[in-house]
Image (tube, rainbow, N blue to C red):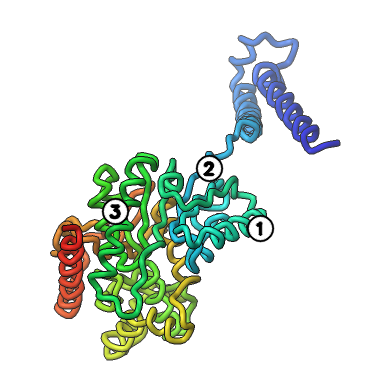
Amino acid sequence: MSWQQGACSDYMFNLNVFFICIYMLDQWFIPASVSRRDYYKLELMENHLMLQKVIVVSVALFLFWKIIKHIASFLKVEKEPLRVLITGAAGQIGYALAPMVARGVMLGPDQPIILHLLDIQPAAEVLNAVKMELIDAAFPLLQGVIATTDVVEACMGVNIAIMVGGFPRKEGMERKDVMSKNVEIYKAQASALEKHAVENCKVLVVANPANTNALILKEFAPSIPEKNITCLTRLDHNRALAQISERLDVPVGDVKNVIIWGNHSSTQYPDVNHATVTTGSGEKSVRQLVADDQWLNNEFITTVQQRGAAIIKARKLSSALSAASAACDHVHDWVLGTPKGTWVSMGVYSDGSYGIQPGLIYSFPVTCEKGEWSIVKGLKIEEFSRKKMDATAKELMDEKSFAYSCLK
């Protein structure tokens, strides 16, 4: 017997028993020699009948629930595929990120995906090789791969855009030269996203300077809601969690609610003042468990700030695997929601919270629900934190002015 025949047989059995129960509600245990009216006048028999009805109704409701569940399983509609754009897809981060998205790490194990991969013309051959590998991996969720050097084709109908591509600083280049190149790149990509992506497209900027690149993208895609343009500081957030985990020798999953304030740069402020660790006796503050303010206020902060540089020095290449994983974490929590009582760090458009100038893309603690992020409000900020937060905000204001000067 096939599984379909077996399922149908179970369904018919449940249905038959259900209707028998309904019939029994009217007929069960009523003596043939006693009229229905006389029967209900007998108090003892009435109580007996009530008990029987309760039993039968309970069985009937249970079977009814099973029947509805069975019907729903036949009517279940597979989710529509989401189109995910990765720019700079032939690069190292793109190479690490694409299979994570295709496997369901970013959007869940039941969400079909169509990947849009974009890179520059000189990388076209490598980009096509990435496409071939994705096809060869036979990911069940992957319903298609578009690999292109045409920004319009890449942006067509995308639901989520991960902006990994950017112009790297080369030896002998001035900072303004790099910024000018990135302004041109993000100006073109912003225009294509605005015209060709879906109306509610969510954008994550990874390429550095991430905060300011996101701001430029927003400038040239005014119809994309400002809440839909974010930048990646989740990598720094994850690095901070990992440092606390190693220091306390606890699972990293037991540490939560660190904060990355500000810019994705060496001025960022990793803040543990509200962070906690789940222990056998409940949640305890990180400061209480570490019991070393000197380390938390100095070495810990510097380690997180300089972690990217340390990886470049050791690997001779920038972070790729951890950056790709953080991008998945960022979008996963944004789309599917953060766990109750937990916040994460995202570079988002400032609304003036915590005294940060509106109009900057600044990293805040956020919670996410139903595809929307919200800045965590009302956290106490002491003087040490205030100075750190203001310093990174100033750097972002300087970067903004510098980037806008490149537009002229």
> Residue 163's spot in the image, x, y percent?
39, 58
Residue drawn 61% across the image and 31% down it: 75
> Residue 277's spot in the image, x, y percent?
40, 75
Q: Which residue is mark 2?
A: 81
Amino acid marked by disc 2:
Pro
Q: Is residue 292 above or below residue 80?
A: below
Q: Is residue 251 above or below residue 361?
A: below
Amino acid marked by disc 3:
Lys
| Mark 2 or mark 1, earlier in chain | 2
- Please name which of the two marks, 2 or 1, marks the residue nearer to the observer: 1
Left or right of 242 on screen, residue 169: left
Quadrant in the picture for the N terminus: top right
Amino acid marked by disc 1:
Ala
Q: Is residue 395 above or below residue 101?
A: below
Residue 325 seen anywhere in this rendered image of the structure: no
Residue drawn 52% across the image and 56% down it: 101
Which is nearer the eye, 9 or 306? 306
Mark 3 and mark 1 in contact (Cβ < 8 Å)?
no
Q: CA distance from mark 2 to mark 1?
A: 18 Å
> Under tag 1, what secondary structure?
loop
Q: Residues within 10 Å of mark 2 (few under 14, many from 20)?
A: some
> Under tag 2, what secondary structure?
loop
Q: Which residue is mark 1?
A: 137
Q: Residues within 10 Å of mark 3 (few under 14, many from 20)?
A: some
| Mark 2 or mark 3, earlier in chain | 2
Tag shown at residue 187: 3
